[in-house]
Image (cartoon, rainbow, N blue to C red):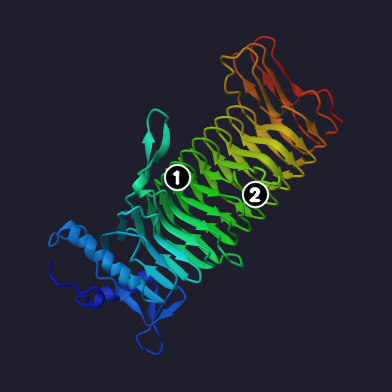
Amino acid sequence: MKRINDLGLAGWSAVFFLSVFASCGVQKDRWGQGRWRVGGYRSDKTLFLNLLDTNDERYSLEEKLKHNTKVFSMALMKKNGILIVPVGTFRINGGFHLRSSLFLCGISKNESIIEFMPENDEKYFIHIESPAKFSVSALTINNLGSKSYYDTKQNRYVPLTNLKANTTSIYIERASDVQITDCQFVGGHYGLEISNAKAKEKGAILVYHCIFQNQAASSIRIKNSQFIQIESNFFLNSGADGLKTNKGTANLVISKNISKMCGRDGYDFYDGLVKSIVSENIATENFFHGYDMKGNPDSVGNYVFHDNIFSDNLASNNGYYGFSLQNVRNITMNSNKALLNGKSGYLFNNVQDCNFNALSASKNREHGFLLKEISRSIFSNSIAVDNNYKRCYTEKNPNYSGFYFEAKADGLTINSCQAGNGISRNAKGNQVYGAYFDDGSVNNKFINCDFSNNIGGGEKGYGGAFHSQNIN
């Protein structure tokens, strides 16, 4: 192989330097001493990586892979350095463990592409561990290990797992200051995994304006971590969930993200989320739920999903429930919308001491709100309009309601809510109500509600406002 400079600036034009600095936000220090600032970092160790493009025909694939891996490995040893990846596609082996501060920057996520080729049972491309201060910007990491694919029999994305390449692109562990912005993650088991993060203030770990696509499991997985901000990202075609949290996760801000066509849930908080804010997100066309909020009890029976605020989120066209809440306490939901989901707009099961305001459920295939074992909670200014029971054409006695209390409902206050235009077409024996309570529901109060204009189509249909044994 020809002799190649491992690091340095040889052969780069002044015009290209200017374009790199403009794209990466790199500016020369005001003293003119050759120090450069990137995203708040200042360093004497700015390195323009002399990598070989996959389309460079002067070298074999093996030579390019070996050279690029060596260059990248040497560069990561530079403490407090700024590494700039040029325009091109560069294949690299992984398994890099980083414990010093570093900024890794491309020209743009569409132009600077790293293809991570796992080998030797590597579990990650880059492992960031405290006390490192780490930032990645304007870069694509294409993980050539595991990925998702569309299964035409199941009609959803599922994992295609390579056990020898079941890797995470970036793994953050016990770190407290990490920023990942304007990047793209393709493939891998997880695009990003955050574990035992030690951040102590809001936004100390930030994932902003990134695209995650075709991960075999979840785009992002967070466990035993806090003070993380996940904002304005796009999760697409994951084999499992767009975003997944586990036990020990608290004080998160999850906002303005989109999760689409994932193989399970758009947002999976199944295993825990505490004292967090989830706002202005979209979950659409996911196979199961838009938002799965099931707080499984921990080993000593404590619930792991509580004291969260959900506001202004949208769940549309998901296969099952728009919002699924089970085993939760002390949750506030404001101005969320469930539209065109395959089952009910909202499922509430074993829910206590919650406040639900200005929720809407429209054109879902079953009920607007399906409630099971719910107590000491308040619904106000919420509406269920034009929902249709999924099996109204085939079942003899389908039952649609705007608010359907399937099991015990105790101590609820329903204030200024509406449920109308309930339609079950051409089926016999329909029972269609604004609110329907099974026997055993007690101590519930309705204030200024309008549950009129519910229609039972077909023979012996029953339209009306209520069906209940106990309404106070």
Residue 42 occupies quadrant:
bottom left
- The residue nearer to you, when weighing 263 against 40, is 263
Q: Secondary structure at mark 1?
A: loop
Q: Amino acid at mark 2?
A: Phe
311 sits left or right of 197 in the view: right
Q: Look at discs 1 and 2 and give the one toward the viewer.
A: 1
Identify which residue is drawn at 54% across, 54% down. 222
Q: Identify the secondary structure beneath mark 2.
A: strand
Residue 146 in view of the camera:
no
The circle drawn on residue 217 is: 1
Which of the pair 232/177 is nearer the observer? Answer: 177
Residue 313, x across and y down, in percent: 59, 47
Q: Residue 117 or 134: which is nearer the viewer?
A: 117
Q: Quadrant of the N terminus?
A: bottom left
Callout 1 amino acid: Ala
Q: Residue at x 57, y 19 (%)?
A: 391
Image position of 189 with respect to 25: above or below: above
Between the residue at mark 1 and the residue at mark 2, the CA separation in whole angstroms equals 24 Å
Instruction: Give the total number of marks visible in the rendering.
Output: 2
Q: Residue at x 46, y 49 (%)?
A: 219
The location of residue 239, given as percent across then percent down, is: 43, 41
Residue 103 has which mark? none
Residue 383 image position (x, y, % from top left) = 69, 36
At which x and y percent is residue 432?
Answer: 69, 21
Q: Which mark is residue 310?
A: 2
Look at the image and tell me whether residue 17 can be seen. Answer: yes
At 61% from the left and 31% from the top, the residue drawn is: 344
**Which image quarter is the C terminus in?**
top right
Tag 2 or tag 1, which sits nearer the N-term?
A: 1
**Residue 428 quadrant:** top right
Lateral position of residue 333 relative to residue 7, left or right: right
Q: Is 454 drawn above or below residue 310 in the view shown?
A: above
